[in-house]
Image: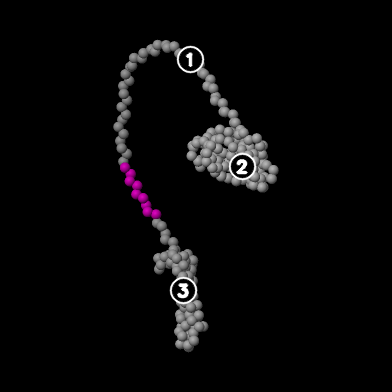
């Protein structure tokens, strides 16, 4: 009995789903029989429909009772089942007798002749200052319009990974600005991203250069006004490395 109660409690959710499906079938059978009863012309047909309605009602009631029984077993009876007591099993320890250790034999010291080292001249190395390579200066892109300008990275810079674009994108009747790139000197411009807030001397956005193969590329900033026109874009050359 205890095993049956635990089995019902473990599969209560599946039993609920099954009983709900059965109840739905009985309810559907009741509705169909009721419709046939209302549409029946002859008394015999009406009586047969009433009989099917009674059977569907009885089945639905039994299904609801089964739901209540499952609920009672899974929430009440399973909590009243005493938990089995776990009796610890003693562990047998096998004790082995200690292994006798043989006495340690100490070697007899033998006198060794020691040669006197001859003095050698010491060579003193003078440390040489290693020149620290200076970081090449950033060459800004040749963009005469102060409202359409990229100050970092510089023109011809070598970049890799995710880079930040610093500069300005702010013109009269500003609408938005966007980033575009293409292979160096050929091909159509490929759209990267659009921004709807003007920027003056700050971070314009970022570009993940890992999305393109290594090589030389042209990158440009295009600032568009409310009429759809835009001044000359700010273009710079970049060398993408892996």
Q: Position of residue 189 (x, y in %)?
A: 55, 42
Give the alpha-carbon distance from disc 3 to disc 1, as whole Å: 101 Å
Q: Secondary structure at mark 3?
A: helix
Q: Which residues are drawn in magenta?
A: 88-96
How many C-alpha atoms fall within 10 Å of the one at disc 2: few (<14), some, or many (≥20)? some
At numbered mark 1, what does the secondary structure look like: helix, strand or loop?
Answer: loop
Q: Please give the residue where the numbered disc 2 appears in the rendered image.
A: 222
> At 62% from the left edge and 33% from the top edge, which residue is drawn?
142
**Residue lying at 52% horizontally and 41% vertically, measured from the top left:** 187
Q: Dot 3 corresponds to which residue?
A: 25
Where is residue 67 shown, x and y percent of the image?
48, 71
Residue position for label 1: 124
143 vs 105, nearest the viewer: 143
- Which of these two is toward me, 118 or 87? 118
Please tell me whether residue 162 is drawn above or below residue 87 in the rendered image. above
**For residue 89, above or below residue 215:** below
Q: Main secondary structure of the magenta part?
A: loop
Lower sequence index among marks 2 and 1: 1
- On whether residue 84 falls in the magenta region, the answer is no
- Using the rendered image of the protein, determine whether residue 208 is visible from the camera's viewpoint: no
Neighbours of disc 3 within 10 Å: few (<14), some (14-19), many (20+): some
Residue 99 image-quadrant placement: top left
Q: Is residue 27 visible?
A: yes
Tell me what residue is drawn at x 48 percent, y 81 percent.
Answer: 36
Dot 3 or dot 1, earlier in sequence: 3
The answer for how far apart the CA atoms under marks 2 and 1 are is 63 Å
Name the image quarter holding the N terminus: bottom left
Question: Residue 119 lies in what quarter of the image?
Answer: top left
First of labels 3, 2 by sequence position: 3
- For label 1, the crowd category at 10 Å Cα-Cα, with few meaning under 14, some 14 to 19 and many 20 or more, is few
């Amino acid at each position: 009995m205890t095993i049956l109660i635990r089995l019902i409690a473990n599969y209560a959710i599946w039993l609920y789903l099954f009983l709900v499906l059965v109840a739905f079938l009985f309810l559907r059978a009741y509705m169909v029989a009721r419709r046939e009863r209302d549409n029946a012309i002859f008394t015999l047909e009406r009586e047969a429909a009433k009989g099917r309605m009674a059977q569907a009602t009885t089945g639905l009631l039994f299904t609801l009772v089964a739901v209540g029984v499952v609920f009672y077993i899974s929430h009440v009876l399973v909590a009243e089942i005493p938990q089995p007591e776990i009796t610890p099993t003693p562990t047998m320890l096998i004790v082995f007798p200690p292994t006798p250790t043989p006495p340690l034999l100490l070697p007899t010291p033998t006198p060794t002749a020691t040669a006197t080292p001859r003095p050698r001249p010491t060579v003193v190395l003078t440390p040489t200052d290693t020149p620290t390579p200076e970081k090449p200066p950033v060459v800004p892109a040749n963009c005469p319009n102060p409202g359409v300008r990229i100050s970092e990275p510089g023109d011809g810079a070598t970049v890799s990974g995710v880079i930040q674009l610093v500069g300005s994108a702010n013109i009269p009747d500003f609408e938005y600005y966007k980033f575009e790139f293409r292979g160096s000197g050929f091909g159509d411009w490929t759209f990267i991203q659009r921004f709807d807030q003007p920027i003056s001397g700050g971070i314009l956005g970022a570009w993940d250069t890992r999305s393109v193969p290594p090589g030389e590329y042209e990158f440009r900033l295009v600032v568009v006004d409310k009429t759809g026109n835009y001044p000359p874009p700010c273009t710079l050359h970049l060398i993408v490395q892996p």
